Amino acid sequence: MSLNSIFQYFVPKDKKFFPLFEQAGANLIEMAKLLNISVNSTNLEERKELSKKLEDLEHVGDNITHQIHLELGRNFITPFDREDIHALASSLDDVADFIHGASNRMQLYNVEQPTQPMIEITALILEATEHVAKALFELKDLKNIRNITDSCVRINSVENKADYIFDKAVADLFEYEKDAISLIKQKEVLSAMEDATDKCEDVANVLESILVKNA
Amino acid sequence: MSLNSIFQYFVPKDKKFFPLFEQAGANLIEMAKLLNISVNSTNLEERKELSKKLEDLEHVGDNITHQIHLELGRNFITPFDREDIHALASSLDDVADFIHGASNRMQLYNVEQPTQPMIEITALILEATEHVAKALFELKDLKNIRNITDSCVRINSVENKADYIFDKAVADLFEYEKDAISLIKQKEVLSAMEDATDKCEDVANVLESILVKNA
Amino acid sequence: MSLNSIFQYFVPKDKKFFPLFEQAGANLIEMAKLLNISVNSTNLEERKELSKKLEDLEHVGDNITHQIHLELGRNFITPFDREDIHALASSLDDVADFIHGASNRMQLYNVEQPTQPMIEITALILEATEHVAKALFELKDLKNIRNITDSCVRINSVENKADYIFDKAVADLFEYEKDAISLIKQKEVLSAMEDATDKCEDVANVLESILVKNA
C-alpha cells in the first residue's frame, strides 16, 4: 500500500462528491437509453419527443456539473485532487453533450430511418455509459481499484467496437450510397454517435489518471 | 480562505507572466476583429489582405507563447503551477490557430460570399475572445475569482450559441444546397469557425481548472 | 538548477519506464515506415499485407502501453509524476491508432492510387515519429532538456507543414475533383493522415508540460 493510500484513512474527506458523480453516471445511462429507444422507433413523433427529453436530461447533467463546481468552492478537503474532480466532471458533461448532439442531428437533418450501424453504435453508447456509471460508483471506495480499472478496459473495448462499426459503415456508404448529400448526412450522424463513445473513453482516461496518481 | 490562498501572500511571485497573457488576449481580440471585418466585406482583395494580416497576427501570438515558455525556463517561482501556465499558453495558441484557419480556408476554398451563419459565428468568436481577454486580465488578481468564473460561464454560453447556429446552418445546407461539393465547402468553413469557439471553451476549462486548484 | 532538479539526484528512481518509452518510439517509426512503403506502392496486394502488419504493430504498441501501466502499479517512485507517465503513454498510443487508422481507411475505402499529398503527409508522419522517438530517448537524461525541447519544436514545425499540405490538397479537391463522393473519400484519408501528425504534436505538448514541471 502506498503512502498516499495510508494517508487517506487519516484524513477526513468530504463525501459530497460521490453522490453527485453517481447521479451524473445514472443520468448518462438514462440518456443513452432514450437514444436507444429513439433509433429503434419508426414513429417520427415519438422520436421528436425523445429528443426533447434528451435535451432536458442534458440540462439535468449541466446542473450536476454545476453542483460539483459549487462543492469544489465550499470544500477545502476533497477525496482526490481538486483539478481531477473538475476534469472528471467536465468529461462526463462532454458525454451528455454528444449523446444529446447525436439525437439532435437526427432531428435537424430529418433522418427518417436510422440505419443498422446507427442502432449498433447507439447500443454500444449504452454499454459504455453503464461501465462509466459502474466505475463512478466504485470511486468512493478506492479499495476496489481493480473494478474501476476493469470498467475502464471495457469502455476502451466498447469504443474500439464503435470505431470499427463506424469505419465499416462509412466504407459501405462510399460503396453503395450514390447520393453524395445523403452520404454526408448519414456520415455526420454516425460520427456524432461514435464521438459519444470517444468521450466515454476520455472519462476512462481521466479515471485511470486519478487511479495512477493515488495508487 | 484556503491554506493555499493564505500561502500566496507570503510567496514572492514572478509577475512577468501576466502582461504576456494580457498581450495574448489582446491579440486574440484583434484577430477576431479582422475575421469579422473580412466576413462582412464584399471586396475580395480586402479579404485577401485581411487574411495575410491574420497570418501575421498568428505569428505575433506564436511569439507571445514562445516568451511565456522562456519565462517558464527562467523563473523557479510562478504565480500558479508551471504546467498550468504551459496549458493556458497552449490553449490560447490554439484559438489563434483556428481563427487564422477559418480565414485561411475561406481564401483557399475561394468562398466568394460569406453566408449569414458565417457572419453570426464570427461575431460570437469576437465575443468569446473578449471574455477570454477579460478573464486573463483578472488572472493577476486572484481576489476577483468570481469575475474569472463569470467570464468562463459566458464563454461556455457563447460556444453553445455557436454550436446551435452551426447545427442549424448545416441542417439548412442539407435541405437547400443541392450542389454536394459546395455543401461540403461551406460546412468546412463553418466548422473551422465553430472550432474557434470550441478552443475558447478549452481556454475556459484550463482557467476553471487553475481556479479550483488554487481556490 | 531548480530545487526539483537537485532533488532528483538523491531520489532513487525506477528506470523501467525509459526502455518502454523507447520501445514505443521505435514502434511508431516502424509503423510510419510501413505506411510510407504502402502509399508509394502500386501493388494492391502488397498494400493489403502492409495494412495487416500495421494492425499487428498497433497491438505491439497496445502491449507497451499496458506494460507501462503495470509498472505504474508496481512502482511507488517514478522518474516523473505518475499522471504524466500515464498521459505520455496515452498520447503515444493515440499516434499508433491514427497511423493504423490512415492505412485502414485506405483499405476500407478502396483507395486505388494514393495521391501526391497523401505521399507527402505520410513522409511528414515518418519525420514526426523520428523526432518523437528522439525526444523519448533523451527523456532518461533530463540534463539534455534542450534536445527534447528541440525535438518538440521540430514536431510542431512538421505538423504545420502537414497542415499546410492538407489545406492545399483539400482546396485542390474542391477545385478539380468533380465527383463529390470521391472528394469526400480522399478528404477523409488525408484527414486521418493529418490527424496522425496532430497526435505527434500532442505528444510534444505532454513532453513540454513534463519539462516545465521538472525544470
Image: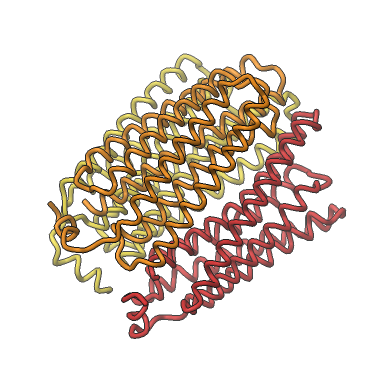
Chain colours: A orange, B red, C yellow
Is residue A98 among the parts visible in the rendering? yes
Residue occupying image coordinates x 49% and y 33%: A32
A99 or A43, nearer to the observer: A43
> With respect to residue B74, does A118 lie above or below?
above
Is A158 left, or right, of B116 in this rendering?
Answer: left
| Image location of residue A208, percent across then percent down | 31, 45
Image location (x, y in percent) of residue A148: 28, 40
Residue situated in front as seen by the camera: B188 or B56: B188
Residue B198, how many percent across, how many down? 58, 52
| Residue at point 25%, 38% (across, down) | A147
Residue C38 in view (yes/no): no
Q: Quadrant of residue B70?
A: bottom left
Q: Nearer the viewer, residue C172 or C188?
A: C188
Looking at the image, is B14 positioned above or below residue A6?
below
Q: Quadrant of residue B55?
A: bottom right
- Horizontal and vertical percent position of residue B104: 69, 50
Q: Left or right of C100: which side holds B153? A: right
Relative side of C90 to B184, left or right: left
At 61% from the left edge and 15% from the top edge, which residue is drawn?
A: A175
